[in-house]
Image (cartoon, grey):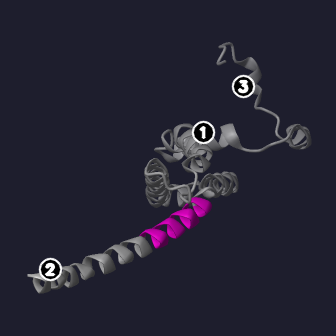
Amino acid sequence: MPLDLLRELSAASPATTSLANIEDLERVVLRELRQAVEGMKRSALTFEDIWRRILLDVANGHTEEVQGVRARLLHAFAERLEQIKETQALAVGYRRLGRADAPDPDDLLPAIERLERLKADVFDRWQTAEDLEDLVARDYPLTTADLDRIGPHRRPPASFYAEESKPF
């Protein structure tokens, strides 16, 4: 009988090895999660920079080219927003499990908020090339000095002054 007990105990040793492997995997996952959080904190800045480059491209007459890559850009944007939300949720889960070594999920909230705002302000409104040009006109970074410099050379047509309606 005691020999049978010893055999049962030795049969349980693979479970201990398996548990050690799980702990190693968890350490790897947490390390990768920390790296993902650090990298994704800059996601909003990346897409805001892309929008600024789009503004310049459209202002330089490349509306059709930019419109042509709209679908791919929106797909990449949606994919990144989903990834950052999933990463934040994973960090929340590890923190709820009591893992103090998990990254702070709140570190991603500003990036998520900025991406959501960019989505609402730009990407949800941009369907056509005309929409794109309207958004560029709204967001183009012209300073007062720029307007003063180009204004005298870009007078409105005479018909503008004869206009009786109040568009604004």
Q: Which residue is mark 1?
A: 134
Give, as a three-letter code, the residue at label 1. Asp
Q: Which label sits on residue 159?
A: 3
Q: CA distance from mark 2 to mark 3?
A: 101 Å
Which of discs 1 and 3 lies nearer the camera? The answer is: 1
Residue 36: say if magenta.
yes
Contact between marks 2 and 1 (CB within 8 A): the answer is: no
Q: Which residues are magenta?
A: 26-39
The image position of residue 154, as x and y in percent, is 82, 40
Residue neighbourhood size for the residue with mark 2, other residues' Cα within 10 Å, grouped as few (<14), some (14–19), many (≥20): few
The image position of residue 85, as x and y in percent, is 47, 50
Which quarter of the rendered picture does the C terminus lie within?
A: top right
Which is nearer the eye, 72 or 6?
Answer: 6
Which of discs 2 and 1 lies nearer the camera? The answer is: 2
**Which quadrant of the view contains residue 118?**
top right
Contact between marks 2 and 3 (CB within 8 A): the answer is: no
Q: Residue furthest front?
A: 2
Q: Which label sits on residue 5?
A: 2
Which quarter of the rendered picture does the N terminus lie within?
A: bottom left
SS at circle 1: helix
SS at circle 2: helix
Q: Residue furthest left?
A: 1
The image position of residue 54, as x and y in percent, is 63, 55
Apparent side of residue 85 relative to residue 62 in the rendered image (left or right): left
Give, as a three-letter code, the residue at label 2. Leu
Marked residue nearer the N-terminal end (2 or 1): 2
Apparent side of residue 13 relative to residue 58 in the rendered image (left or right): left
Q: CA distance from mark 2 to mark 1?
A: 79 Å
